[in-house]
Image (tube, rainbow, N blue to C red):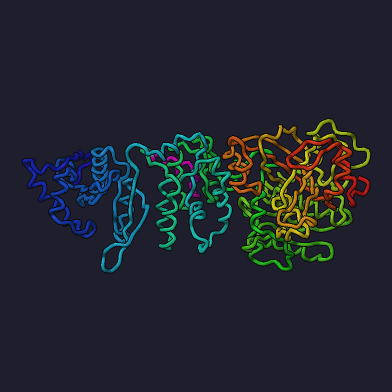
Amino acid sequence: MVQALDVIDVRIWDPQGNAATGEFEQIVTLHRKSKATLGQLPFAAFRQAGEQGHLLMGFVNGKLEGYVLYSTPRHHTLKLVHVCVAVGARGTGLAGAMVEAAIRHNPGRSTITAHCRSDYGLDGFWRSLDMTPEAERAGRAKAGSTLIVWTRRIGPRDLLEEALYGSARPLAVLDSNVLIDLYSSEAIDRHDRHESSGLSEDWIVDLLELTYSPEAYVDLKAFADAGERTRMQRRLGSLVALRRVDGMKALVEQLISKMPSAMVLKDRSLSSDAIHLADAILAGADFFVTRDNNLIEATSEWIAREYDLEVLRPVALIQQMMPEAALSRFRSDLLESVGLAWSTVSTVSAALEQAFLDHRSQEKGAFFKKELQAVLASPNSARLSVLTDKRGRQLALLGTRVQGELLTVPILRVARGTLGSTIAFQLVRYLRDIALSLGAAAVSVVEDRLDPVVANALRADGFVGHPMVVTVARHPPEGLKRLASAIDVAAYERQNWPQILLDSGLPLWVVPIQPTYARGLLGFNDTLISARDKPALGLSREFAYFSSPKIKAWDVPARVLWYVTKDTNAKEPTAVRALVAHSRVTDSVVMEVGAAMSQYRSFGTLREREIRDRSRDGRVRVLRFEDTQLLDEPIARRNLGPIFDRFAIKTPIQSARMVPSHLFDVVVRDQPGFEGR
């Protein structure tokens, strides 16, 4: 019978010691009694390990009750071959003491591992040693078996860990449900996985250090599909895991005690979640990212205040990391790369209902379905449309109704995740376009379950009140006073698109652009260029243009007239060479090429090589522009001559050139659709 206060002692077996023979026999006896889970091992292997100093004996109250036999197969690894404790001494902490002794005797090792058959039922034992199941492989048993590779990081941090812990960027720990979203194959049906996929975007990876608790391997081990388990375990290697440290178990108990007891009793997974949280807190993490709403609710009142850790969903983190300026809170490249298209909805399917049901507010499916059917019940004045990509993913749902000069929007929802958030900041422009095409003078959004991202986008675009309303018009109102500054002009035009304020004095540049880039960047097409297959082009808002840094600095905001240069593949009589569009420039900055590509390449169409071709001494100028409008009738070079002569502009236009601001007014007034603007 083990005493209440046990004295534990761990020693290295000395083959030359006076008691060596008796000790060895006791070790062998312990092995025989536990051979069912330890497996066969020749006596010679015991003696060889002893001669190398790799055989440890564990004593409880002076009696030899266990042993550890280990090897050092590689320069950084300590492999536990046997960890054996007599039945009567289990629960004393002997196993942990022996393993810690082995670690102390091998200070240069960085990883401790053990291989154990999954059918032995020893997961709890290995977890008590703070080891996690990082991999698996086939065993050698005739009946078939699986060996689980249990590991733990030990010793000094390696270079990758030092980079992770020493980074100045916020540290975000990903929950297992997010990791599965990111690393499981498309064959696994993961509801809402697209919300997590935004965390793999280059722009957010550059702003955060992403990592995970070693407890994630325990969660993955419970995944039924062996192939998927292996896939995810391997892909986790792309991230650096947190190091488990002392104090984790005590902290887990604290965290569970702070959660509502009723929730802990009802949702047993919260106890496991607490291990993830403890690892994150002890690592000094800033965020814990999960799609577990119960965990968010159970910690919402206290964890940020007491432990300085924010527990939130992926989309909330993505929105938090986005730049504050509304005009940069979207990703044009996401929309322009997935082939979006609108289609009319005639019946409400279960898939449509599930895709846009507002789980955040616990909306009832029956109520949502009634709202959709109310739109469908008025086919003469109302329309329900869904935005999908080429893979059939449903990304936005829009219900509109025309009542006189008012376009009412009873349904305005976006899919959860990064792409949904991106669409939200561009749908508001699409609403204006619909209203103007239907002859409406105002848009009223009466959707009563607006996502906060959508609501913010509406406010940024000038919608006010409740319901949120904005007036729309193609031309500025008569008698509008001249605005005081270029910034005021830009702000007005942005909130009142597609209105243009003429005679505003905004700086103006003419920028030459090759036809292939005009097609991709501006949406320009003519008979010489195949039609651009971008059904949702109307959603595009902002882009970036890369040019030589030698061009002098721009005063922004400014306007740009885009001049499409000769199409080198076309015959001279049919070469493009025409003024085709105008935009408003919001920023002009010279940057290192690497930084420019990292921050802005997704907003443009150039490849890395093409961007570098435009650089000088490793630097390139980046122009950010928005609200591009194609001219109703492009102005060919032969017709531009007299206009340029009037403003003493020399031709040809071979590089970006600043020109008198009134040239813009002349170009716009000469358009067939100007209508006295």
The image quarter containing residue 105 is top left
Q: Position of 97 compared to 439: left or right?
A: left
Magenta region: 248-266
Q: Nearer the viewer, residue 539 or 255?
A: 539
Q: Residue at x 78, y 38 (%)?
A: 509
Q: Nearer the viewer, residue 604 or 161?
A: 604
Q: Is residue 254 magenta?
A: yes
> Which residue, as the protein is rendered here, is positioned at the far top?
484
The picture places residue 123, in percent across and down from the top left corner, at 33, 54
The picture places residue 160, in percent across and down from the top left corner, at 41, 40
The picture places residue 662, in percent across and down from the top left corner, at 87, 37
The picture places residue 534, in percent across and down from the top left corner, at 71, 58
Residue 495 in sight from this viewpoint: yes
Q: Main secondary structure of the magenta part?
A: helix
Quarter of the image containing the C terminus? top right
In the rendered view, tell whether residue 162 sits above or below residue 572. above
Q: Residue at x 63, y 60 (%)?
A: 355
